[in-house]
Image: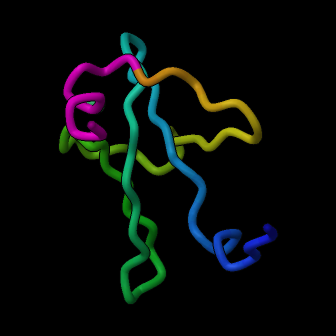
Amino acid sequence: MNDNETQQMAQPIYYDDGRVIHACDSAITDRGVRLVWTKCDMDVPEDRSFTVEGEAPAISCPECLARIG
Ligand SMILES: [Zn+2]
């Protein structure tokens, strides 16, 4: 099955704070500014977040892991 509509979803975003890798959420404000924050509610500087093509990195933040379920 080829579901092209899922291609429009944002890629998962990650943030490496130097100790652990967090899973992130993001949103575009009505001013076109992209906001990124971790699942454990840390603000992420936009230029520090990253996406990965292919194999996802292992999330190592325990709080993010708990919230992902
Ligand atoms: Zn986290």
Q: Residue at x 40, y 60 (%)?
A: 26
Q: Please, is residue 30 above or below residue 46 in the view?
A: below
Picture coordinates of residue 31, whole percent (x, y): 41, 86
User: Dividing the image into 4 quarters, which one contains the N terminus?
Assistant: bottom right
Q: Residue at x 35, y 44 (%)?
A: 44
Residue at horizontal 27 percent and vertical 32 percent from the top: 64
Q: Nearer the viewer, residue 5 or 13?
A: 5
The magenta region covers 60-69
Residue 15 in the image: x percent, y percent? 45, 34
Q: Please, which residue is most extreme toward the bottom here? A: 30
Position in image of residue 47 (x %, y %): 53, 45
Question: Which residue in the rendered view is the most extreme toward the top?
Answer: 19
Q: Residue at x 22, y 39 (%)?
A: 67
Left or right relative to 29: residue 5: right
In this rendering, would 19 be left or right of 12?
left
In the displayed structure image, the side of residue 30 where residue 56 appears, left or right:
right
